[in-house]
Amino acid sequence: MPRILIVEDEDIIRSAVRKLLQHAGYEVADAVSVEEAEGLDPDSFDLIITDLRLPGAAGTEMINRAPNTPVLIMTSYASLRSAVDSMKMGAVDYIAKPFDHDEMLAAVASILARNPALAEDTDEPGAHSDSSNVEADPSAIMYGQCDAMQRVFTLIRKVAPTETTTLIRGESGTGKELAARALHLLSPRAKKPLISVNCAAIPESLIESELFGHEKGAFTGAVSARTGLIEAADGGSLFLDEIGELPPEAQARLLRVLQESEIRRVGSTESRKVDVRMIAATHRNLKAMTRTGEFREDLYYRLNVMQIRIPPLRERRADILGLARRFLARQANKLGRPELSLSPEAMRTLERYRWPGNVRELENAIERASILSDGDIIHPSSLDLDNDPTDDHIPETLVEGNNEQVPAREADDSSDLSLEDYFQHFVLENEDRMSETELAQKLGISRKSLWERRQRLGIPRKKT
Ligand SMILES: Nc1ncnc2c1ncn2[C@@H]1O[C@H](COP(=O)(O)OP(=O)(O)OP(=O)(O)O)[C@@H](O)[C@H]1O
């Protein structure tokens, strides 16, 4: 059984990652600092997962203290730069916080799969020594039983080994990033890094140097040369999420990378060869954007060699309950409440709702309801979907039968109150490290509704 060491000073994250990995069948030890980890013979583990910022020595120090063990760095989006630096120092991969469970398990499985010694005596998914991750399947990475998702999986299986540049289209929260991960893990590059970049999350002024790197003195503040994320993905895959947000200068540079397989750092006259498989995603209509001049047409055609469309959740209603059960099981495990289940009425509510925020919204609704529900059975009131857009045209026959006999419960004021409390608590706790868009996404509501609730609760966004 592969042994994993977690080094993380935040109790909640450390224990959540430990439980997740133990549940997935790994043997896990943990420490709150590099110094404590040193006492555990870190080089005897198969993998070390460490936070970057720790009290005492930085997480990257584990690379030196355990020279024979792969190190996976956990970091926030805000410190992507440090993630690239840590990869230069020898970390095998990084994972951006907040990450979800599937992402962490996929990253762990992919790293362990690179260790041939483990491949012989483990039946962990993905743990084998073959050069392409042929045993991996999209269905192991993302859930989808309905015909529409089965077609997506078939396409991923066909496209992944070809290494063709791929454009993934779909509304926000449909699973585009998971699809990109599946494309990478099923390709011959599975053992090399997958670098994911959200073009909308990086300030416009920084995006070029983030992606392409820069030379010392290229601009004010460029005190030393930096490797960009594209170079960091050399040999592996680069996932450019929200590609429609890329400013024109960066579009021109990216086109060059796609045409010539060459990269030129900001402030440099020299080009370097890079070998990167590009996967891009967007929720926007890029073709229409080429007509208005917002997106380069030549770049669009370069990216759109192959296209995968992930359908919105309302077009795959047959999968809603399967997904909900999967998220519920995860929450039950996380909260130590194995009996959590959905009432028949809650199932009906889930199936009728339109899900404008797609799978992400469903995941958040289940997380919220699991925390808020007093008993083991989740009722519609704790799903908090009542006032949101429902699709009344869904025939009752789509609602799956269920044997649970549950007394109907009136929605009461106290559940509203605790929901507001939860909202307030969540916003105040996370607003310093998350943008408004991220907060809204995590809460499964729109930015506008986040703004309105902030005003109502008297917690407006602090000016930075
Ligand atoms: N088919 C699926 N099975 C399991 N989880 C899923 C599935 N699709 C999406 N998710 C989960 O929903 C959340 C959103 O997915 P993801 O980030 O891949 O969406 P996205 O389309 O890239 O969103 P955005 O466009 O906003 O970046 C993630 O937590 C992901 O794990």
Image (spheres, grey):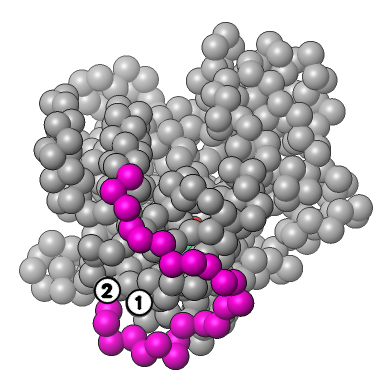
Quick check: 168 above or below 264?
below
Residue at 24%, 64% in the rendered image? 388
Counting from the top left corner in percent of width and height, residue 245 is at: 22, 54
Q: Which residues are magenta?
A: 391-414
Q: Which of the marked residues, 1 or 2, is nearer the chain's N terminus?
A: 1
Is 396 covered by the magenta stretch?
yes
Please tell me whether the stretch drawn in magenta is mainly helix, strand or loop.
loop
Q: Quadrant of residue 187?
A: bottom right
**Quadrant location of the C terminus in the rendered image:** top left
> Ligand 1 falls in which quarter?
bottom left
Quick check: 19 above or below 30?
below
Counting from the top left corner in percent of width and height, residue 74 is at: 54, 33
Quick check: 363 above or below 40?
below
Residue behind mark 1: 352
At label 1, which amino acid type do we have?
Answer: Arg
Residue behind mark 2: 390
Q: Are marks 1 and 2 in contact (CB under 8 Å)?
A: yes
Residue at 61%, 30% in the rendered image? 14
Q: Residues within 10 Å of mark 2 (few under 14, many from 20)?
A: some
**Quadrant location of the N terminus in the rendered image:** top right
Q: Quadrant of residue 463?
A: top left
Residue at 31%, 37% in the rendered image? 421
Q: Residues within 10 Å of mark 1 (few under 14, many from 20)?
A: many
Counting from the top left corner in percent of width and height, residue 420 is at: 28, 41
Q: Left of 290 or right of it: where is 113?
A: right
